[in-house]
């Protein structure tokens, strides 16, 4: 599938499919409102095994679905204070991630270092 994308695009997306690919996939699926279709296309083009993608995307969608359902139920019931608290919690997590996004992406781009060698290994 790499032939469908330019080498520059493939290089930019390469960090997603390296060793941390499953973790990145899980974290991206945790984000409520994030365009999941885009993620499906991205990870579908990657060499990530299907079973890894299916497991991480499903595990990431469960908490998101629960939070969005609870938010809808609270709004319908008129519990606006709970909605405001949930919004504040999401902002408290999202704002630092946005502000430090360059450091986060740099860390994800960094190649993993090999572990210490064991004697006789």
Image (tube, grey):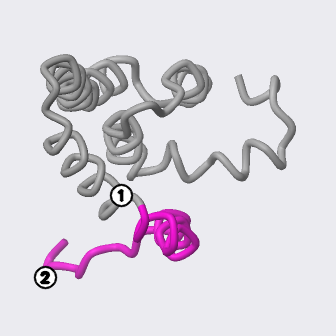
The location of residue 69, given as percent across then percent down, is 20, 20
Residue at 22% over, 25% down:
75
121 lies left or right of 88? left
23 lies left or right of 73? right
Q: Residues within 10 Å of mark 2 (few under 14, many from 20)?
A: few
User: Is 97 above or below relative to 69?
Assistant: below
User: Is 32 above or below relative to 109?
Assistant: above
Q: Residues within 10 Å of mark 1 (few under 14, many from 20)?
A: few
The location of residue 80, given as percent across then percent down, is 20, 37
> In the rendered view of the protein, which quadrant contains the N terminus?
top right
The location of residue 78, given as percent across then percent down, is 16, 26
Residue at 42% over, 44% down:
21
Q: Which mark is residue 38?
A: none
Q: Could you say which is closer to the camera, residue 37 or residue 42? A: 37
Magenta segment: does it hold 114?
A: yes
47 lies left or right of 61? right
Residue at 19% over, 24% down:
62
Kindly identify which residue carries mark 2. 119
User: Mark 1 falls on what kind of element?
Assistant: helix
Q: Quadrant of residue 70?
A: top left
User: Mark 2 falls on what kind of element?
Assistant: loop
The reply to whether dot 2 and dot 1 touch (C-beta < 8 Å) is no
73 lies left or right of 27? left
Kindly identify which residue carries mark 1. 91
Q: Could you say which is closer to the camera, residue 2 or residue 37? A: 37
Q: Which residues are magenta?
A: 95-121
Query: Counting residues from the N terminus, which is met first, the one under dot 2 or under dot 1?
Result: 1
User: Is 90 above or below relative to 42?
Assistant: below
Q: Could you say which is closer to the camera, residue 39 or residue 6? A: 39
Residue at 35% over, 73% down:
114
Q: Quadrant of residue 83?
A: top left
The location of residue 103, given as percent across then percent down, is 51, 76
């Amino acid at each position: 599938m790499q032939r469908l994308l330019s080498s520059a695009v493939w290089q930019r997306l390469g960090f997603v499919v390296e060793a941390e690919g499953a973790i990145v996939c899980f974290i991206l699926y945790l984000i409520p409102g994030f365009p999941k279709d885009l993620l499906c296309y991205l990870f579908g083009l990657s060499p990530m095994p299907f079973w890894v993608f299916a497991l991480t995307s499903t595990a990431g969608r469960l908490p998101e679905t629960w939070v969005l359902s609870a938010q809808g139920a609270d709004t319908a019931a008129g519990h606006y204070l709970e909605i405001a608290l949930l919004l504040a919690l999401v902002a408290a997590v999202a704002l630092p991630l946005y502000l430090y996004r360059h450091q986060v992406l740099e860390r994800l781009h960094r190649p993993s270092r090999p572990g210490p060698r064991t004697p006789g290994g």
